[in-house]
Image (cartoon, helix red, strand yellow):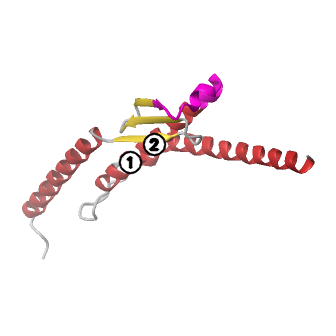
Amino acid sequence: MTEPIKDRLARAIAELEETRQAVDRAEQRLRASTVTVRSRDRSVEVTVDAQGHLDDVRFLNGTYRTMGAAQLSAAVLEAARRAQADAARMVMDTFRPLSETAGLLPRIEGSGVEWDDVFGPLLHTVDKAEEARRRAGDGLRDEITEDGEKG
């Protein structure tokens, strides 16, 4: 026998209220959340909030004093982009389970949030920048090795 519509509706309303409360709790946690990342050269530390807004920049261990403007700028941008990507991942990880149905309600195509569409460009940009940085570092190591072999 099928469940009466009144009972199904009451269950759906209760599930919707549970989801709303879970979203409220997640939003409260995220409002208080920050992400802190150090640049790879450990000269700069950047903190962003859950929305990726820059909250703090700290210059560490005096290294910044010997860096050129372009090098310091690159360190700040690298740390900020990585922190923003980490914040985006944190938001995705927090809300993805809430945006997916538990199988109790029918899934309506196009009704959910496509988190990869929302944050994908940011994550892709950061991944691309990190790959370029790795390749540049590999080239520098090759040059250092070659110089060491010559002399």
Q: How far from the left and from the top, in percent, is residue 138?
A: 74, 48
Q: Residue furthest bottom?
A: 1
Q: Is residue 74 visible?
A: yes
SS for tag 2?
helix
Check disc 1 and report the residue beneath it.
90
**Highlighted magenta segment, given as a residue range:** 58-74
Q: Quadrant of the N terminus?
A: bottom left
Q: Quadrant of residue 65?
A: top right
- The kind of residue on which mark 2 rests is Phe
Residue sitting at 27 percent across and 38 percent down?
A: 31
Q: Give the camera-side residue of 86 and 70.
A: 70
Q: Where 19 falls versus 63 (above or below)?
A: below
Kindly identify which residue carries mark 2: 119
The image position of residue 11, as x and y in percent, is: 12, 61
- Which numbered disc flags the more N-terminal residue, 2 or 1? 1
Q: Nearer the viewer, mark 2 or mark 1?
A: 1
Q: Is residue 68 magenta?
A: yes
